[in-house]
Image (tube, rainbow, N blue to C red):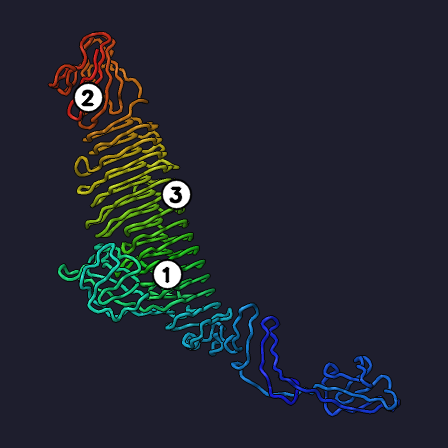
């Protein structure tokens, strides 16, 4: 490096951000060499080498001379024409000299733009460091594990692999916040055995016991000592109460401290469950969490060993905040590509996971043990058991969002949420399932919204919602999904809602709407209350592209469970085997109660609409092509049928059993007709109109007809009069004569 020599000291150096030119300079003076012309001499010798005409200025008698009027060779200057006699010649030379070296920390870097802050060259260069700076080779064959660990320990915030491939043979750890690790391939394919190749680990402090209950909806926690908790940091509140006995999940959730006063921690948001102390054995506690924050993994390709015997994970994140895994590719990790464990506000985006093949595991992205607001979006998976799994047994994963992903050749459910989750969104994903026992999407937690997904080619359930929790209130929304090529006529359903809780949980609402289902399936939509109540159920606007082998829409309650306040509206149910729409209470009559079945289009089936042990169901306005019965009821009460579209039926035999969807009957026989009327208890409010066209009597097979002028039930319906008529209406006990001729 060089500069002009002068009498002043060396000044500052700068780097111009626009030109990236480094200039070191001072306030240097110029060296002046004087000569006298004689009109003959053209060559003059300078005291120093100017190192080119650009570093000279020549004057003759004060007049500047253009540089084409002379030449320069080292210290010799030669004029093309001899200067005049007695003329004064001045050659001004900026002498160049080497000043030696300096350190980059004292050279200023001036960014361009208004308000830019001056830093130094060292800090600018160190904003990104290469793994090669720490001795990594990056040829794919040299073991670079130690060098990569040095880089991760260095304190530098932005570490790049410069697009090279690095062989890694043992676990790496990250122990600091604010790190970006990017642009490399990590090849761990030579290492087998149980291993988590990159681990990021925050900490959780000691448990502090609650001294008062913190119940659902409260935003305070009372403890004996708040000294270990930090305002605006996170904490984990938990107890021994069982959230799910099926998978031994204990209650717990992430909370954030807003303030602390004395023994009270005030939270930014409410606790979502009851955390009780002492007495009942729940022993609720809370512990501070110190997270590692603001970590980014970007443009990294991970290559595993495809070790199907042992569990291997590419990236495990434990108690971290704001982790971003962006545009990364993972392949051949037998347990999982990425594991989030009790992480907060973190995501995987635009990444892929392939070939996770360990039996019983094989996860792409795992969200476990009480995470909060973690998302997987716009990702791709292939040949794995589950693209996304949510669950484990220590704490509830809250506000998880799975959106816009594609799971190809899923060996089981493409998206699999175990009981340890609540308030989850599964939206806009595509699942291609290949396993004979696989579901498309499974949710076993408490509250979910499953919408606008496409499931293709699975064998069991296209979408399974199966809450397996013990406390709280659950709800489910399954809407706008397209389920195609669902296939196993003897066992499966397009959509299966199974409220299978065994605790005190009730389902406050289930909505199954606007889905399209096609394939070879036993049930199109199957809603089952196994152990508890479903209090509100809406099945509306669904379209079945193919016929169910058994039932289009099947609503069932097991003994001890119930379904109430249901609406089955506007569905298109094509030809089915046994039932178009089927409501079956397997326990007591009335376990399925208070509902409407209206505006549905039902294709040919043995029973268009079938009710067993229901109560207070109104059936109206359906296009019903049931072949044996349009409506068939057994042991029901309070069924109301809109019969306006039903045909007139003519009775010609000595006995006749009134169909459950009949309203208008004509007796046309030369002799008495004995009519078996529908059970009044099953059709409270139903109307029958009967008339004769011959002078013959019509009687009931049972004493269940009350005459128009009496209160006691008998068998008489119509006298032996041609043109006699009667209007009967069920009061739930008998058929009451309301009008007669």
| Label 1: few (<14), some (14–19) or many (≥20) C-alpha neighbours in 10 Å | some
Separation of residues labelled 3 and 2 (CA atoms): 43 Å
Q: What percent of the width, then of the height, locates residue 148?
A: 43, 75
Indicate which disc, 3 or 2, sits on the residue closer to the N terminus: 3
Residue 596 bears which disc, if any? none
Separation of residues labelled 2 and 1 (CA atoms): 65 Å
Q: Is residue 248 toward the left or the right of residue 600 in the image? A: left
Q: For numbered disc 3, what is the local secondary structure? A: loop
- Note whether residue 437 is visible: no
The image quadrant where one finds the C terminus is: top left
| Label 2: few (<14), some (14–19) or many (≥20) C-alpha neighbours in 10 Å | many
Which residue is disc 1 drawn over?
Answer: 345
Furthest-left residue in this view: 712
Indicate the quadrant where residue 252 lies.
bottom left
Indicate which disc, 2 or 1, sits on the residue closer to the N terminus: 1
Q: What percent of the width, then of the height, locates residue 515?
A: 37, 41
Nearer to me, 554 or 71: 71
Q: Are marks 3 and 2 in contact (CB under 8 Å)?
A: no
Q: For numbered disc 1, what is the local secondary structure? A: strand
Nearer to me, 665 or 486: 665
Which residue is disc 2 drawn over?
Answer: 677
Is 432 located above or below residue 320 in the figure?
Answer: above
Q: For numbered disc 2, what is the local secondary structure? A: loop
């Amino acid at each position: 490096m060089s500069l002009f020599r002068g009498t002043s000291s060396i000044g500052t150096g700068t780097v111009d951000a626009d030109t990236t030119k480094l200039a070191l300079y001072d306030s240097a003076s110029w060296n002046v060499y004087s000569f006298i012309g004689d009109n003959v001499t053209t060559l003059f010798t300078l005291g120093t080498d100017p190192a080119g005409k650009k570093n000279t200025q020549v004057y003759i008698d004060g007049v500047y001379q253009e540089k084409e009027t002379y030449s320069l060779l080292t210290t010799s200057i030669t004029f093309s024409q001899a200067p005049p006699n007695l003329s004064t010649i001045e050659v001004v030379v900026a002498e160049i000299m080497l000043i030696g070296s300096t350190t980059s920390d004292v050279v200023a870097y001036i960014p361009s733009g208004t308000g830019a802050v001056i830093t130094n060259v060292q800090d600018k260069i160190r904003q990104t460091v290469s793994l090669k700076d720490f001795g990594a080779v990056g040829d794919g064959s040299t073991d670079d594990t130690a060098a990569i660990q040095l880089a991760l320990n260095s304190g530098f915030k932005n570490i790049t692999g410069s697009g090279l491939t690095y062989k890694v043979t043992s676990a790496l750890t990250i122990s600091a916040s604010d790190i970006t690790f990017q642009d490399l391939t990590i090849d761990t394919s030579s290492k087998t055995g149980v291993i988590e190749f990159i681990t990021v680990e925050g900490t959780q402090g000691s448990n502090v016991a609650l001294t008062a209950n913190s119940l659902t909806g409260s935003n305070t926690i009372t403890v004996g000592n708040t000294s270990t908790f930090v305002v605006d940091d996170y904490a984990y509140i938990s107890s021994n109460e069982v959230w799910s006995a099926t998978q031994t999940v204990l209650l717990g959730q992430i909370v954030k401290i807003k303030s602390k006063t004395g023994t009270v921690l005030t939270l930014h948001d409410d606790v979502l469950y009851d955390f009780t102390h002492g007495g009942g054995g729940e022993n609720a506690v809370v512990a501070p969490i110190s997270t590692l924050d603001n970590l980014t993994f970007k443009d990294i390709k991970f290559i595993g060993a495809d070790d199907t015997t042992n569990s291997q994970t590419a990236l495990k994140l434990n108690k971290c905040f704001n982790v971003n895994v962006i545009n990364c590719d993972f392949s051949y990790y037998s347990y999982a590509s990425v594991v989030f464990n009790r992480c907060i506000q973190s995501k995987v985006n635009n990444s892929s996971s392939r070939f996770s093949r360990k039996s019983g595991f094989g996860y792409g992205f795992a969200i476990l043990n009480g995470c909060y607001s973690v998302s997987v979006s716009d990702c791709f998976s292939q040949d794995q058991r589950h693209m996304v799994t949510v669950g484990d047994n220590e704490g509830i994963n809250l506000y998880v969002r799975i959106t816009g992903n594609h799971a190809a050749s899923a060996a089981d459910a493409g998206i699999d949420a175990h009981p340890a989750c609540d308030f989850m969104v599964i939206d806009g994903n595509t699942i291609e399932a290949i396993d004979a026992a696989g579901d498309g999407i499974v949710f076993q937690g408490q509250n979910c919204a499953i919408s606008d997904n496409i499931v293709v080619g699975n064998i069991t359930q296209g979408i399974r919602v199966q809450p397996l929790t013990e406390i709280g209130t659950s709800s489910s929304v399954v809407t706008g999904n397209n389920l195609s090529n669902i296939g196993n006529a003897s066992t499966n359903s397009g959509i299966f809602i199974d409220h299978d809780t065994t605790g005190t949980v009730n389902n406050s609402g289930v909505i199954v709407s606007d889905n399209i289902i096609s394939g070879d399936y036993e049930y199109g939509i199957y809603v089952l209350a196994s152990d508890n109540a479903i209090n509100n159920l809406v099945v509306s606007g669904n379209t079945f592209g193919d016929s169910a082998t058994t039932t289009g829409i099947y609503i069932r309650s097991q003994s001890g469970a119930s379904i109430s306040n249901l609406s089955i509206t506007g569905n298109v149910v094509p030809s089915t085997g046994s039932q178009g729409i089927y409501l079956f209470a397997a326990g007591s009559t009335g376990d399925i109660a208070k509902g409407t079945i209206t505006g549905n289009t039902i294709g040919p089936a043995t029973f268009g609409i079938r009710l067993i042990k229901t109560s207070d169901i109104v059936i109206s306005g359906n296009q019903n092509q049931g072949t044996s019965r349009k409506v068939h009821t057994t042991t029901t009460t309070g069924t109301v049928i809109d019969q306006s579209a039903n045909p007139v039926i003519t009775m010609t035999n000595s006995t006749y059993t009134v169909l459950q969807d009949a309203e208008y009957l004509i007796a046309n026989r030369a002799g008495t007709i004995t009519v078996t009327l529908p059970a009044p208890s099953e059709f409270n409010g139903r109307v029958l109109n009967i008339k004769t066209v011959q002078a013959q009597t019509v009687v009931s097979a049972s004493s269940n007809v009350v005459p128009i002028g009496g209160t006691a039930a008998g068998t008489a319906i119509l006298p032996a009069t041609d043109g006699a008529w009667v209007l009967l209406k069920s009061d739930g006990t008998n058929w009451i004569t309301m009008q007669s001729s």
